[in-house]
Amino acid sequence: QQQVKQSPQSLIVQKGGISIINCAYENTAFDYFPWYQQFPGKGPALLIAIRPDVSEKKEGRFTISFNKSAKQFSLHIMDSQPGDSATYFCAASRRTGANSKLTFGKGITLSVRP
Amino acid sequence: DAGVIQSPRHEVTEMGQEVTLRCKPISGHDYLFWYRQTMMRGLELLIYFNNNVPIDDSGMPEDRFSAKMPNASFSTLKIQPSEPRDSAVYFCASSLWDRVYEQYFGPGTRLTVT
């Protein structure tokens, strides 16, 4: 059973455009929702994270929007650049406590065309 | 801190051989995670430790896989005997106890079993 589902599976965007990646989760016990970015040959790295009591969080060109009632959250990349081309994973976790672990989505590959 | 350190970076071995992957987490981190990444299955959590104690090994594919964490600064993932379907990139990650959503990944070990 996949607890965190991402869409689309891949995305191609022109330079300067907006990239939007969506994620849906099932377990209402999750209380932290991070996005990870992975470049080829590297390990994933935390990009931005949000708590469910916040509807939006922005860091530079990256914004997470969170809809608790729909159990969905999304990553928006404004003014997409070729350097943003990478694989993006959404994830969900309990922040602390027993059995805290990250549940990852399958990842989507973003290609930003120059 | 040098970040999470993994060795070797690449391993090529023949089917039936024993393989040992090594990980040094970030000093002071409480959690250590082992993941496997393939194109088909994405990023899979194999096992994780809290203060050197295994918490959940339900992701370990079968008895051929074993993991240990003898102290806070070292962990191993062993595959014996190895099979071609074990070919993947294996990542180690670590985090603080109250920031499980913020995991720091190592560079990974690319394992090829022929």
Image: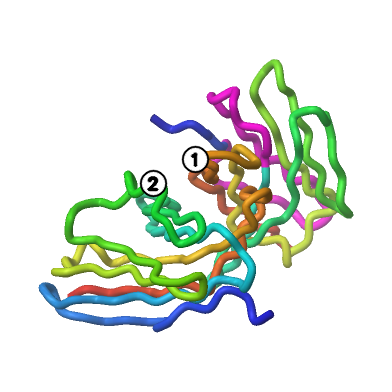
Chain letter of mark 2 equals: B
- Under circle 1, the secondary element is loop
* Residue that label 2 marks: B56
Query: Is-magenta flag for residue A70?
Result: no
Of residues A114 and A49, the one nearer the viewer is: A49
Is residue A54 visible in the rendered structure shown here? Answer: yes
For the N terminus of chain A, the image quarter is top left
Neighbourhood count class around disc 1 (C-alpha, 10 Å): few under 14, some 14–19, many 20 upward: few
Q: Residues within 10 Å of mark 2 (few under 14, many from 20)?
A: some
Q: Which residues are magenta?
A: A7-33
Which residue does the numbered mark 1 point to in the structure image? A99
Question: Which residue is rendered at x = 74% and y = 45% of the image?
Answer: A49
Q: Position of residue A62 (x, y in %)?
A: 81, 49
Image coordinates of residue B11 in percent, x first then y, are: 32, 81
Return the x and y of residue A19 as percentages of the image width and height: 73, 46
The residue located at (84%, 34%) in the rendering is: A56
